Image (cartoon, grey):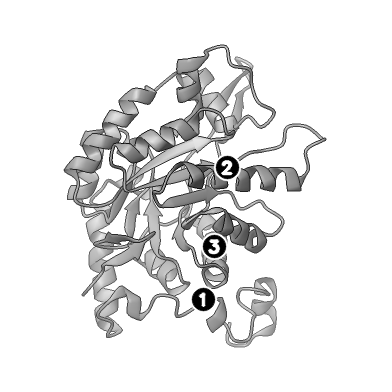
Amino acid sequence: MDLSCRFMGLSLPNPIVVSSSNLTADIKGVRKAAEAGAGAVILKSLFEEDIASMVDKSRKASSFVHPEAAAYIEHMGMLLDADDYLDFVETASGELDIPVIASLNCYSEEWWTDYAERIEKVGADAIELNLSPMATDAKTDARDIEKKLIGMVALARKTVKLPLAVKIGQHYSSLPNLAVKLEDAGANALTLFNRFFKLDIDIEKMVFKSGNSLSAREEFGPVLRWVGILSDLVGMDIAASTGVYDASDVIKVLLAGGNVAQLCTVLLKEGLDVISKISADLEHWMERHEFTSVDEFRSRLSLEDDQRNAYYQRLQYVKAFRKDS
């Protein structure tokens, strides 16, 4: 069985990508991911605050402060040195024979574009931009947020020639409209979806703390739905992230028109050996259905193939009105 695929113009031996996490925080981790059979790895994110702290530790907070990054700095400390990150990218890119995708987690246009350029120079195959500007005042409306998001992608495209994946959340009024604008701004891929920092409060100490950061299988449904819709509406590649646990989830992503599936929580819970099991189960499924390559069945059940426009556009009514559901 041929599991190879293309993502942002890159050749992957299979569509299983290890997402940005503590598993990919150092060279030892990414080596293990590659040895386990990953199709590509996304390095642990470098936060904009990591970069800014090297320039101005008393930097004033932006009105678009990203809660994940703020908590990361305040409660967990500076886990990555921005210059060490460049060494990490260079080492990983030189050692691995699968694509190495750097990750930048940012909320403004300050500082990080310089590091995007440096990341390109040290050999990364692509960059995943975790972009999640948010409104923290009543004056900022939805158009302001989307305009800022699109502007950051356009700036990144002007800064580097590397393939750019944009990882966003799902809480936008019109994802198809936003996706088209992100593609026009220069994005090569869209990652669905970003799971934001979960805020919690310790009621005894009366301080902030982090909530559960792991995804649940139940979160996969909305991801699959939007993969199927957006894969037919844009020319960008689509990566599914959040709630992907086994080979059946990966197969569903491919059938819906996605290019790759990102794994994180299942690997943290069960270990990297899950990758080889998913690959084997994917091969067995392809053999049963007489497919010899991933491209033979990818996008068979995307929006265009849902001829009655029910399962994607009127999902909530299908079970009630369709005998075949």
As drawn, 40 above or below 301: above
As drawn, 44 above or below 51: below
Element under disc 3: helix
Residue 31 lies left or right of residue 311; in this view the side is: left
**Which residue is the extreme one toward the top?**
58
The residue wearing badge 2 is: 152
Q: Nearer the viewer, residue 316 or 38?
A: 38
Element under disc 1: loop
Q: Amino acid at mark 3?
A: Gly
Query: What is the distance, in whole Å, between disc 3 and disc 2 at their CAs?
Result: 29 Å
User: Which quadrant, please, contains the N terminus?
Assistant: bottom left
Q: Nearer the viewer, residue 195 or 114?
A: 114
Q: Which mark is residue 302?
A: 1
Name the residue located 46 percent from the left edge and 71 percent from the top edge: 257
Judged by depth in the image, the label closer to the viewer, 3 or 1, is 1
Element under disc 2: helix
Q: Amino acid at mark 1?
A: Ser
Residue 310 position, x and y percent, is: 64, 80
Q: Amino acid at mark 2?
A: Met
Residue 313 position, x and y percent, is: 66, 74
**Which residue is the extreme one toward the right?**
139
Residue 275 position, x and y percent, is: 26, 55
The residue wearing badge 3 is: 221
